[in-house]
Image: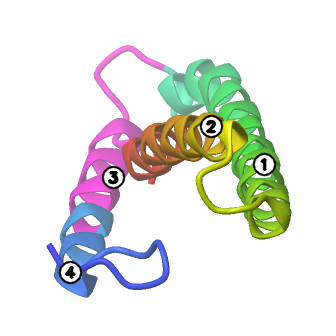
Amino acid sequence: RVWEGGGEAAGDRVGRAGARAGVLAFLATPRPGAAPGALLVALAPLDVALGRVRRVAHELNNLLMTILTLGDLVRSELPAGSDGVADLEEIRAAAHRAGELVRDLHHLLD
């Protein structure tokens, strides 16, 4: 995959969008004896929950960016070889790992 600016390869996005559209079309097709759209109505709470998860992932990403930015600022003020530099590197590494998890969560929800 080619990642640019946190995005994904265009082919991946189009392929998933097409698959998602096919699933939604299947779900929207009335089944014998079922009220039209009944399944979509039943899935509405899931859509609300997924929207909340997307917002939480977005907020986590914002917090991680703050942590990384402030870490860079503090690091630039520390003298080379300072004990705090190693601690800040651990913080940055953890924030980057958390960012990867948030990115994975975004892709799972897209």
Please determine whether, in this image, residue 42 is positioned above or below residue 22: above
Q: Nearer the viewer, residue 5 or 43?
A: 5
Q: Does residue 94 appear anywhere in the picture?
A: yes
- Specify which label sits upstream in the sequence, 4 or 2: 4
**Residue 84 screen position, x and y as percent:** 71, 39
Q: Which residues are magenta?
A: 18-34
Gap in Å between the C-alphas at discs 1 and 2? 8 Å
Q: Nearer the viewer, mark 1 or mark 3?
A: 1
Dominant secondary structure, magenta = helix
Is residue 54 among what the camera can see?
no
Secondary structure state at the residue bearing disc 4: loop
Instruction: Calculate the distance from the C-alpha at mark 4 to the C-alpha at mark 2.
Output: 27 Å
CA separation in Å, label 4 and label 1: 26 Å
Residue at mark 3? 25
Task: Indicate which label's residue lies in the foreground, 3 or 2.
Answer: 2
Q: Amino acid at mark 2?
A: Ile
Residue drawn at 20 percent across, 80 percent down: 2
Q: Quarter of the image holding residue 28?
A: top left
Location of mark 4 (residue): 2
Identify the residue shown where x is 76% and y is 33%: 52
Q: Amino acid at mark 4?
A: Val
- Are the two marked residues, 1 and 3, in contact with CB atoms closer than 8 angstroms? no
Q: Residue at x 66, y 43 (%)?
A: 88
Whichever of callouts 1 and 2 sits on the residue coming sooner in the sequence is 1
Front residue of 79/10: it is 79
Q: Position of residue 7 (x, y in %)?
A: 42, 76
Q: Which residue is denoted by mark 2 in the rendering?
A: 91
Q: Which residue is mark 1?
A: 67
- Mark 3: which secondary structure? helix
Q: Quadrant of the C terminus?
A: bottom left
Q: Hey, what amino acid is under mark 3? A: Ala
